[in-house]
Image: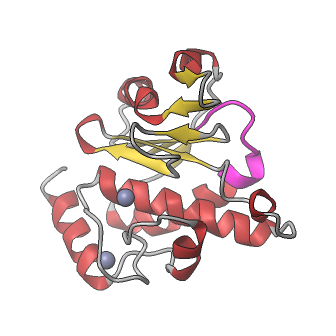
């Protein structure tokens, strides 16, 4: 699995995701590495000047291509650009199992974004949860009704903060089955 920093996303953040996701997925047979940072240039066509946001799905084919070249089973882009999808005000991230690719945005995960005091630990925890969530989708998991499970849908950081950073036992069982059949 390849983690791909996009643009100016902080090395510290990417390092924390690598450590957590790596220690979780490596025992499942999926080693995790970080690639060189990608320039934001290829994603400028995803920019919507009316919304001052980027259309998330446009990131996935390019990320998938980067992953394919490195023979990675899955690729996760990490950007600090603000992402959206049609019909939604914003998205924390999205995934496409068929492309083996996902992207997460850190834009709305800092407490400062909501007028709260900076808290680097909380920020990093949220980034890790969004990473684990989108990677679960890449490997075929859907949303989980368990509010503590990382596969529960987050409408806001309040939902994200309730979740644990890991899959519940039912989701983990399904994940292992999916990994075995090579999804
Ligand atoms: Zn989801
Ligand atoms: Zn679950």
Q: Is residue 126 left or right of residue 183?
A: right
Q: Residue at x 46, y 35 (%)?
A: 56
Q: Residue at x 43, y 72 (%)?
A: 150
- 131 and 145: which one is in front? 145
Structure colour scheme: secondary structure
Q: Residue at x 58, y 74 (%)?
A: 158
Picture mark count:
0
Was residue 63 drawn as part of the magenta stretch in this picture? no
Residue bounds of the magenta highlight: 4-14
The image shows residue 57, relative to residue 62, as above or below, that is below
The image shows residue 53, relative to residue 160, as above or below, that is above
Q: Is residue 135 left or right of residue 120?
A: left
The image shows residue 34, relative to residue 39, as above or below, that is below
Q: Is residue 32 left or right of residue 13?
A: left
Q: Residue at x 41, y 54 (%)?
A: 134
Task: Residue 4 in the image: state x and y as whole percent.
Answer: 56, 37
Query: Picture quarter containing residue 177?
Result: bottom left
């Amino acid at each position: 699995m390849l983690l791909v920093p996009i643009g100016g996303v902080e090395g510290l953040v990417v390092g924390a995701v690598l450590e957590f996701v790596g220690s979780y997925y490596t025992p499942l047979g999926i080693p995790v590495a970080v690639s060189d940072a990608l320039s934001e240039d290829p994603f400028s066509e995803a920019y919507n000047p009316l919304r001052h946001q980027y259309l998330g799905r446009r990131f996935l084919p390019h990320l998938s291509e980067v992953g394919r070249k490195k023979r990675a089973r899955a690729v996760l882009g990490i950007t600090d650009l603000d992402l959206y999808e049609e019909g939604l005000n914003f998205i924390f991230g999205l995934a496409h199992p068929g492309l083996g690719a996902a992207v997460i945005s850190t834009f709305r995960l800092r407490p400062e974004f909501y007028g709260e005091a900076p808290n680097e630990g909380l920020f990093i925890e949220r980034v890790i949860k969004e990473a684990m969530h989108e990677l679960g989708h890449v490997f075929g998991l859907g949303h989980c009704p368990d509010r503590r499970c990382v596969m529960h849908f987050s409408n806001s950081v309040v939902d994200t903060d309730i979740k644990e950073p890991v899959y519940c036992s039912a989701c983990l069982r399904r994940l292992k089955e999916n990994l075995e059949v090579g999804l």
